[in-house]
Image: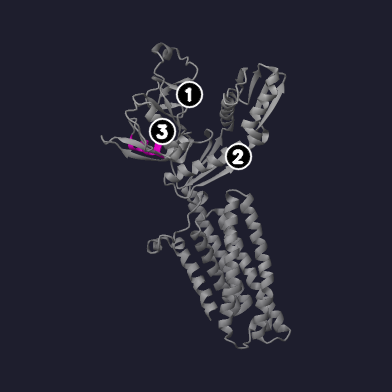
Amino acid sequence: MFKKLAIIFISLFGMLLAVPTLSPSLAPYFPSWIKPIPLGLDLKGGAQLLLEVDTDVMLKEKAAQLYDEVRSAMIDRSKGVIRFSELRNDGKSVSLIVREEDEVSKAKGRLKGVLGNNVDIASSGKALTVSYTTKAREEMIQDAMSRSIEIVRRRIDALGTKEPSIQSQGGKYILVQLPGVDNPEHIKELIGQTAKMSFHLVNENITAEQLQSGHAPSGTMFLQYMDNPEQMVPVYSRVEVSGDSLKNSQADFDQNNMPVVTTEFDASGTRRFAKLTTEHVNERFAIVLDDKVLSAPTIREPIPGGRGQISGGFTLQGAKDLAVLLRSGALPAPLSVIEERTVGAGLGADTIATGKIGSIVGVIFVLVFMAMLYGIFGIFADIVLVVNLFMIVGVSALFGATLTLPGIAGIVLTLGMAVDANILPFERIRDEVRAGTPTLRAVDYGFDRSTKTVMDGELTNLICALILFQFGAGPIRGFAVTLSIGVMTTLFTCLLLTRVFVDYYMNGKNKKIRYIRNK
C-alpha cells in the first residue's frame, strides 16, 4: 500500500511542477524554485551572435612570452650567463646565436630544463631556434576556446540575460543565443572587449621631445589615454601587478559622489600591490586596460590591504560595465562578431500556436485509438500518457532545461514510445488469457514478463540520447535532454503508475476483460 501511495504522490508532484509552464498566470502562487520552463531562441525570439576567436593573436603573445623566457634563461646569473646575440621573435618561434660553440649544448640543456617538453629546440651550428610543439599549440588553442566561452558566459550572466546558450562551434567559433534580447549592441560591446588590465610604473625620465617623436626607448611603451587619445603616457613595459590577480571588482561612488570602480586582489596580487605602493611612494603608476591608460595616479602612501579604486570620469553605467569586464576576467584572445541574426518573437509565437494545434490533434487521436482498442485498460493508458506529458514538462523546468523546437520533437517521440511501452504489457496479458490463465494471474504475468522488454527498449533510447548530448551541440542537445527525461518518466509511469490503476480496477478479482476475450 505504501508503495502505491508513493507512486501516486510522485506522479502528482511531477504534474504540479508543470503547472507554472502550462498556466503562467498561476506561477506567482508557486515557490520560487518551481518556475515555468524557459523558451529557446526559436520559440521566444531574440539575438544570435557568431563570434570568432582570434587564436593567431594569442599565439603571437605566447611567442612574445617565449622570447622573454628564453632571454631570462640565457642571462640567469645564478647558473652562469651564456653569451648570445641576434635574439629574434618572428611571431612563431624564437631564434638566437650562441657566441661560443662549446656552449651550444649547455644552452640547449638549460632551455629544455626551463621550458620543459612544450618546446622543440632545433640547432644549426651555433644558431638555435625555439618553438612550441604542435601538441602545445593545440592545447593553447583549446584552452583559449574554453576560457573564452567561460568568460563570455560570465559577462552575459552578469548583465542579467536569461537562459543564454553559449557553445563552441567549428574549432574557433563561439555561438551565442540570447532569447528575449531585441538589441544586442550593448552585449556585443561587452563580450568583444579583451579587458586585459595591468599596472605599470610611469617612466618620468622621458622628455616631451621623445613623446612627440613616438619612438619609445627599450623597456618603455607610449600608450594613449583612454579619455584623450592625443595624450601619450610613457610607461615601463614591465608588468608590476597583473589583472589576473584581481579577485573582485564593483561599481561604487567616491567621496565626491562620482562613479568609480573598486578592486580587490587575491593574496598574491595583494603582496605585489603592497610592494609596488610601498617602494614607489610619490611616483606615478598607470592602470592599463587593453593597451590604453585608464588613469595614472600618484602613489601617496602604501596600500597594504589589496584594495584599490579606479577613477576616470566614468558614468555609472560605464563603471558597472568595467566592473563586469574586470570581474569576469580577461579574454585570452580577441573576439570578433562575424555574424549576427535577430529572430522575431512572432516566428516563435506562430510555431507555438501551430505546434499546440498539431500536438492536441495528435494526442486526441492516440487517446481515442487506445480507448477503442484496449477498453478500460486503454483509458488507464491514456491517463498515464497525460501524466507522463506533465511530468516531462515539469521535470525539464525543474532542471532548468530550455524548451526549443527540437526539444518538442523529443517530447513527441517520447510520448510515442510511452504508448508502445503500455501496449507491450497489455498484449502479454492477452496472450496469457488466451492460454487459459485466470485474468488476475494473467495481469501479474503480463506486467512482470514484459518489464524486461520495456526496460531494454527504453534504456537503449537513453543510451542514444546520452551519446547525442555528449557529442552533439545546440538543437541536438535540446532534443537529447527532453528525450532523456522522457525515457525516465516513461519507465516510471508505464511500469509503475499503470500497474497501480490496473490493480485498483481488478481489486484482487478475476474480472472479465472484454477487449481480451473478443480480440
Considering the whole magenta stretch, tell me its main secondary structure: helix
The reply to whether the C-beta atoms of the residues labelled 2 and 1 are less than 8 Å apart is: no
Q: Earlier in the sequence, mark 3 or mark 2?
A: 2
Range shown magenta: 315-323
Q: Position of residue 42 (x, y in %)?
A: 52, 49
Location of residue 381 by image quarter: bottom right
User: In the displayed image of the protein, which residue is found farthest to the left?
Assistant: 256
As drawn, the label of residue 237 is 1
Q: Is 241 situated above or below 283?
A: below
Q: Which element type, helix, strand or loop, lies under badge 2? A: helix
Name the quadrant containing residue 88: top right
Q: Residues within 10 Å of mark 1 (few under 14, many from 20)?
A: some
- Pointer 2 or 1: first along the chain: 2
Q: Amino acid at mark 3?
A: Phe
Q: Which residue is mark 3?
A: 273
How far apart in space, not on screen, are marks 1 and 3 (Cα)?
Answer: 17 Å
Residue 495 is situated, as x and y percent measured from the top left of the image, at 61, 73
Label drawn at residue 142: 2
Where does the C terminus fall, quadrant-wise?
Answer: bottom right
Label 3 – label 2 distance at C-alpha? 32 Å
Residue found at x 41% / y 33%: 273
Secondary structure of the residue carrying tag 3 is helix
Q: Tell which circle, 1 or 3, labels the residue nearer the N-terminal end.
A: 1
